[in-house]
Image: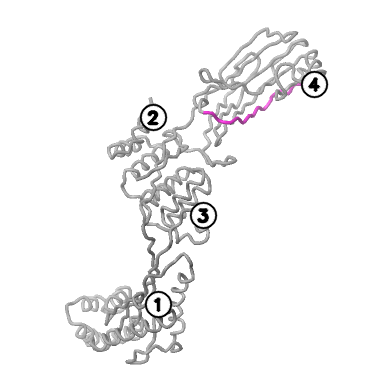
Amino acid sequence: MNKILFYLAAALCAPAAAALTAPAVQAQTQKQTQTQPKEIVDDVTIRDVEIARDGGYLSIGMLLDLGELEVEPNRAVLLTPRLVNGPDSLVLPSVGIYGRRRYYVYVRNGESLLTDREERSYKAADKPASVGYDKLVPFREWMDGASLKLWRGDYGCCNTLLAEQEGVLGRHTEPFFPELLYVRPAAERVKSRSLEGSAYIDFPVDKTTIYPDYRRNTAELGKIRATIDSVRSDRDVTITQVWLKGYASPESPYAHNRELAIGRTAALKHYIGQLYRFDDDVIATDYEPEDWAGLRRYVEQSNINHKQEILALIDSDREPDNREWAIKRYYPEEYRYLLQNCYPALRHTDYRIAYTIRAYSDPAEIGRIMAEQPQKLSLNEFYLVAQQYEPGTDEFTEVFETAVRMYPSDETANLNAANAAMRRGDNAAAARYLAKAGNSPEAVYARGALAVRTGDCATARRYLGEAKKLGVVQAATTLAELDYRNK
């Protein structure tokens, strides 16, 4: 089976963070907060340090307490946060506090004395007691595991660095991202579908001729026509069969009912044939002289007296005429009730309109059809249009949720919908879908990924170990990462 891989933003064996929407991608936000004040460098206290992943960005925030910081007139203090991970680093905008003389030089030059225009600069005498610091930077892979440091530099005249200090404010560790396995459904060679229903055509006693205006026939015949018209007018659809099966009720002799069922079904075939001019082999017919199954369903769901005894007669090996006679003979009151309230509904015609739908391959066309007539799409076509969207976006999720609504019992549809739900952080929906996703290797792996997502490491290892035995290559990688992060 063909598969595609996407990443799931999930906390490693810890409760999931709330979902937030970034400019282009809906992603999980992992916040790492240090609330206790810390004096990292002399006379500067740092509070409320926060490092948060938000989609494709890393957000850095803190509160710089400058109340104890004093700066001489000819000096300057520069406070510069930095992200550092081995040889990689990113210098963030600085906060500069300038003594009186230094500050006036800054004003005259019209630019920062020590760094660039993004620096936040203050005159020492007018500096606020605290400065809120917030910066959003594009996330890079090396930032996973990076330390957030604060560098302090003390400068004298001519920008001479007199002293420097540095302390660690915190560390950013990316949550564990187990890869999700989306399964591509097999393409249908022929997209065969059908619409089914029942019509209750009234015939005069012992007659097999259809009178369209007789009693409720206008409405009942209209049901069949509406069903045929709903697909016949669609250029993408070809009707392959109109199947009719007629039933009679049991109150007359079986042989007579057989003749009525055959004749009335033939009359309906002729009526439809005149309306639509189908080829002779398109309309197929069947019949059942007496609808005992329908009678049994009605009795079982009713509260009539002697229900169990009547059900026993219906289920007996008696000949149909003898069964009907016995109900009438031994339970006359109940028989009269059934004759009046149940038997009319047993005289009906079931119909099924079978048709094929052409295949679609253009994603733009598939997207349009999904919005207007999603029932025309195969699971493979839903999968094709999903490739046009970024995993985790509303559009991506909507594709797989629509697919599972159209195919609620399909295991692959439920598996892909579960993965999409996990990707956007809806673990409850993912669990519901996985309950109907079967036991394929990919479904077992998805249960392991969900266990990681919800913080159940023991369950995660059990499912991932099983998936590994079933041949899911990614399971071994995910297990190794899980063990590494839990050392």
Q: Determine the secondary structure under disc 3.
A: helix
Report the amino acid beneath label 2: Glu
Residue that carries the numbered disc 3 in the rendered image: 367
* Image coords of residue 353 (percent x, y): 39, 71
Label whose residue precedes the other's in the sequence (4 or 2) = 4
Report the amino acid beneath label 3: Gly
Question: Few, some or many C-alpha atoms within 10 Å of disc 2 (few <14, some 14-19, many ≥20)?
Answer: some
Residue that carries the numbered disc 2 in the rendered image: 481
Q: Determine the secondary structure under disc 1.
A: loop
Report the amino acid beneath label 4: Gly
State how far apart marks 2 and 1 are (Cα). Answer: 63 Å
Name the main secondary structure of what is drawn in magenta: strand
What sort of colour scheme is used for the picture? Answer: one colour
Q: Which span is picked out in magenta?
A: 126-140
Label whose residue precedes the other's in the sequence (4 or 1) = 4
Residue that carries the numbered disc 1 in the rendered image: 278
Is residue 125 toward the left or the right of residue 12 in the image?
Answer: right
Q: Determine the secondary structure under disc 4.
A: loop
* Foreground pick, 328 / 372: 372
* Residue at the spot 73% in from the left edge and 21% down from the top edge: 121
Residue that carries the numbered disc 4 in the rendered image: 110
Label whose residue precedes the other's in the sequence (3 or 4) = 4
Image quarter in which the N terminus is found: top left
Is 389 a magenta residue? no
Between circles 3 and 2, the one closer to the viewer is 3
Question: Few, some or many C-alpha atoms within 10 Å of disc 3 (few <14, some 14-19, many ≥20)?
Answer: many
Q: Are marks 3 and 1 in contact (CB under 8 Å)?
A: no
Question: Few, some or many C-alpha atoms within 10 Å of disc 4 (few <14, some 14-19, many ≥20)?
Answer: few
* Foreground pick, 76 / 116: 116
Label whose residue precedes the other's in the sequence (3 or 2) = 3
Label whose residue precedes the other's in the sequence (2 or 1) = 1
Label whose residue precedes the other's in the sequence (3 or 1) = 1
